[in-house]
Amino acid sequence: RGMLSDSRVFDAYENRKSKSFIHIHAMKVKVLSRNPDDYVRETKLDIQRVPRNYDPSLHPFEVPREYTRALNATKLERVFAKPFLASLDGHRDGVNCMAKHPKSLSTMLSGSCDGEVVWNLTKRECVRTLQAHEGFVRGMVVRFCGTSFFTVGDDKTIKQWKMETPGYGEEEEPLNTILGKSVFTSIDHHQKEGVFVTCGQQVDIWDEQRSSPIRSFSWGVDSFSCVRFNPVETELLASCASDRSIVLYDMREATPLKKVIMNMRSNTLCWNPMEAYNFTCSNEDYNLYTYDMRYLDRPFTVHMDHVSAVLDVDYSPTGKEFVSASFDKTIRIFPKDSGHSRDVYHTKRMQHVISIKWSSDNKYILSASDEMNIRLWKANAAEKLGLLAPREKAAVNYSQKLKEKFQHHPQICRISRHRHLPKSIYSQTKELRVMKEARRRKERNVRKHSKPGSMPVVTEKEKHVVTVVK
């Protein structure tokens, strides 16, 4: 510095000062900015919002905490599981069949030996009674537009009725009556056209404008118990026959397509409303079988849990689940791809359940039984009915996700599967399990002491099918 003149020292000092000044102005200054909407309550009754940091290192006990919540949610689900809603008692004989209205959720029809009833489910009362047939009403179906419905009975007639209640002073007369040659056991209507199908000694396809069938199918069978149109591929039909077979038809063909013969007779069947080729049949051997109609050599799922013959089956509108009615006085709900039921409903007074329906809004199940009652159930036993507040919805969804996350944990699995069953069903289930294990053990021992390859292993799915005829 001593070598520089005073003027140059002053210039250097000024230059450094200006540089530091420029540096200070270019520097970023961070300021805390808070939006009052994020943390200030609108009223004193609101809950304080708490900010949450999702960094896993700050929450070392997150999994144990979530497990406890999942366990509590599972326990509360069993506490609040009260599926029974109402009993509709207006019949004077066992209810034999039911039909859903395609347009109105609250309207439902039921038929029995004493005639027939139209119900309003919202008010839970009978809105109309009519004497449809002499003897049992064997089957009923509502037309796809919902303006009329068809019934068949033991008196060999098919009758078409108006859906509207007749006015004051008007007589209850059918719109159309067709006299058949034999007793009809089931009826179903096409999804888009004025065509319906009946079965009895043969499968007949009818046009609404004609009094004789436009096509008839028979395949060496003396009688059929059930026939159903496919709701997706609307030209296809399937029927259950008395020779233990399930027969498939195409309306455009002159002859049936193919049939699968099983070890025991199938009572009814139902097509999956979302998967065109899949159907489930209820069988006399206590099981239900889900088939793909393209591969009938074996069912792709066997649904086991009932302890007596399964009499009816119906799919949910989502196609993910179905409900079955059994002679063992219970109804069970099965996921479509599971071998065991997720829930079982029963009451002390309920007798053999003959008919079952799943409502079109996926919320309710209707069961008709021998002791003249129709019962209304919740499809999800612990579901809260009515409007839910946004916070309630969020809590339900959160609990559901937690239960799914920890569903395979032993304690949660045990609680969610636990059901109180009538003593007779509990003891029969135990007995069937012992019998099945004895059969397995016997097969194992015979195979062990036989020539290698002489006794092939037959899977559970292949055991129940005799043959497929094309």
Image: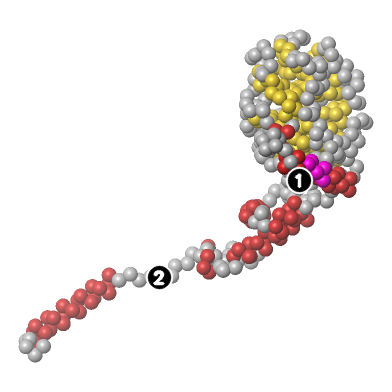
Q: Is residue 168 magenta?
A: no
At 51% from the left edge and 68% from the top edge, which residue is drawn? 57
Residue topped by disc 1: 343
**Up-down relation of residue 396 to residue 98 (above or below):** below
The amino acid at mark 2 is Val
The residue singled out by tag 2 in the image is 31
Pick the front one: 388 or 253: 253
Q: What segment carries the magenta color?
A: 434-443
Q: Looking at this view, is 280 or 101 the one in front?
A: 280
- Three-letter amino acid code of the residue under disc 1: Asp
Residue 91 place in picture, x, y as percent: 90, 32
Of callouts 2 and 1, which one flags the residue occurring earlier in the amino acid sequence? 2
Question: Residue at point 88% right, 16% down?
Answer: 155
| Quarter of the view holding residue 352 | top right
Depth check: 225 or 140 in front? 225
Q: Is residue 362 left or right of residue 172?
A: left
Identify the residue at image location x=60%, y=63%: 63
Number of numbered discs visible in the structure rendering: 2
Left or right of 417? Residue 273 is: left
Figure check: 52 above or below 464:
below
Q: Position of residue 86 (x, y in %)?
A: 83, 42
Residue at point 77%, 15% (across, down): 220
Q: Is 439 in the magenta? A: yes
Q: Which of the image's four quarters has the C terminus? A: top right
Residue 190, image quadrant:
top right
Q: Is residue 309 visible?
A: yes
